[in-house]
Image (cartoon, grey):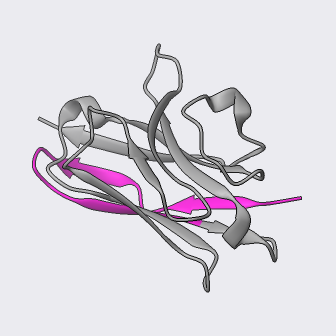
Amino acid sequence: QVQLVESGGGLVQTGDSLRLSCAASGRTFARYAMAWFRQAPGNEREFVASINWSGFIDYDDSVKDRFTISRDNAKNVVYLQMNSLKPEDTAVYYCAALLKGYASRRSNEYDYWGQGTQVTVSA
């Protein structure tokens, strides 16, 4: 069983930055692919960014050049640095773990999920 706990969300203004953190349990964290998804009211959960066990990184085009995903395997934490935030980034952000190690953009392939953290960007 893997537990994921997100933190770092909040209310910010357009152009501000936030850093989300996701702390994971488990002794084999380094083998997991980790990802961030988000879900706005009335919308489906959508892919934001992922980092696999080897460090390969993937971003959705909507956040490329503004968001940075990283991981610290010694601390069992994955981060999402979000810069130049826009109102359309407003959503609940979820951390997810995929045990096979190779990341995916499909939410239904992930094995474990955190409870989510709210990010609200005002205009």
The residue range painted magenta reads 1-22
**Residue 44 image offset from top left, x and y in percent:** 52, 18
Q: Nearer the viewer, residue 111 or 119?
A: 111
Q: Quadrant of the C terminus?
A: top left
Whether 84 is among the magenta residues is no
Looking at the picture, does residue 90 appear above or below residue 36? above
Looking at the picture, does residue 46 appear above or below residue 78? above
1 sits to left or right of 123: right
Among the 4 quarters of the image, the one containing residue 10: bottom left
Seen at 12% across and 44% down, the residue is 14
Looking at the picture, does residue 66 appear above or below residue 6? above
Q: Nearer the viewer, residue 75 or 118?
A: 75
Among the 4 quarters of the image, the one containing residue 24: bottom right
Which residue is situated farthest in the right direction here? 1
**Residue 115 image offset from top left, x and y in percent:** 65, 47
**Residue 121 image offset from top left, x and y in percent:** 23, 41
Q: Quadrant of the N terminus?
A: bottom right
**Residue 76 image offset from top left, x and y in percent:** 64, 76
Among the 4 quarters of the image, the one containing residue 88: top left
22 sits to left or right of 102: left
Q: Nearer the viewer, residue 65 or 13?
A: 65
Looking at the picture, does residue 109 appear above or below residue 83? above
38 sits to left or right of 68: right
